[in-house]
Image (spheres, rainbow, N blue to C red):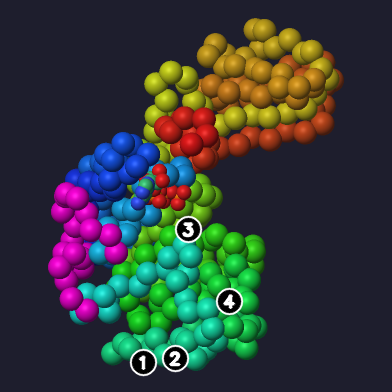
Amino acid sequence: MRSPDSPVLTIDGLIKDVGPLASLDGKMLRVVSGLSLVAERGQVTALLGANGAGKTTTLECAQGLQKRTDGKISLLGEDPDTAGAGLRSRVGVMLQDGGLPPSARPIPLLRHIAGMYQKPMDVDALVERLGINQFSRTSVRRLSGGQKQRLALAAALVGNPEILFLDEPSAGLDPQSRQMVFDLIAELRDAGMGIVLTTHLMDDAERLADYVYIIDGGHNVVEGTVAELLRHDHSAESAVSDRTLYFDAPAGLNFANVLGAGLQVTETRSGSYTITGELTPKDLAALTAWWAERNIMPASLRLEARSLEDVFLDISGRELR
Ligand SMILES: Nc1ncnc2c1ncn2[C@@H]1O[C@H](COP(=O)(O)OP(=O)(O)OP(=O)(O)O)[C@@H](O)[C@H]1O
């Protein structure tokens, strides 16, 4: 676990059992088993995991919404299970289902929430920033999924929290809204807010996160900055290259003796090739020289860096949960 400079949240060996469950003959089910993490002020910390990995349960324990079975949690220096209202006023939470009153209209709702805080954000600026004006006359129950999500973010932010929890922040957002929300998150982070988010979308983590915890089966699997995770080869069984080369060319080409040992060429379908392994500039030069000698001009050519999605699949396996 990284050493904290200015932590907003520290979780140490969190255990959460639920039940007793009839489906388990009245036994308890351990859904989080020894998870630890640190989230810093002025950073976006992402919990990345497949469906059912334990992300929401972990955050709900951190927020004091669920009581933990064991382990230590410090949220802004306090234990969320025993802290009073003073702590809640310093914490912003955007839940997956929004949790907003269905008959409320957006702007009066935000003004009402702002009234409960000592130093709220400027409601008009937040409304403008998140495009809430466009649906200000619509009640919560009639808002689209993306509109509800933007309002839920505004509601979580209006109290001007020191730490903001976001559960799947881009769920239901169209590309424009997603960009708007991401820009706002980056700005808040730069202004010193500690942001903790859960996502199963690698792209969100890659674009937003300063530090990532990949979790599976309720415990930590790997952690690091996005760059660190991309550099590291987590797969024990198969070699994973930093880059993959894709190209379309005449079918049935034989690349024997053209490329270095350790590279794998696969013709994924007739005339579509994939090269994986430790690709070097020399390999690229040899390949293009070989094409030039035979007057082969590929119909398409693409070199792709390893993505966080590849790392995640290497770690948590490719089968569905
Ligand atoms: N009260 C409960 N009773 C039974 N099972 C539970 C309960 N709470 C959580 N679980 C199970 O624990 C696991 C972790 O759930 P959790 O919601 O934390 O996962 P998640 O990582 O947030 O998943 P998702 O990405 O689908 O939201 C899941 O398999 C879930 O079904």
Q: Earlier in the sequence, mark 3 or mark 1?
A: 1
Helix, strand or loop at mark 4: helix
Mark 4 or 3: the one toward you: 4
- 18 left or right of 170 in image: left
Give residue 219's quadrant in the image: top left
Q: Which residue is mark 2?
A: 111
Q: Is residue 148 left or right of residue 15?
A: right
Which residue has dot 3 on it?
168
In the rendered image, the quadrant that contains the N terminus is top left
Q: Position of residue 173 (x, y in %)?
A: 60, 64
Along the viewing direction, whichever of 98 and 230 lies nearer the viewer: 98
What amino acid does circle 4 point to? Arg
Verify CB contact (< 8 Å) between mark 3 and mark 1: no
Q: How many marks do you count on the picture?
A: 4
Q: CA distance from mark 3 to mark 1?
A: 27 Å
Q: Tell me which residue sits at (65%, 17%) in the image.
A: 265
Vertical side of 170 occupied by 257: above or below: above
User: Which residue: 61% across, 75% down?
Assistant: 143
Mark 3: C-beta under 8 Å from nearest atom of ligand 1 = yes
The CA distance from mark 4 to mark 2 is 18 Å
Q: Are marks 2 and 3 in contact (CB under 8 Å)?
A: no
**In the rendering, which numbered label is found on residue 115?**
1
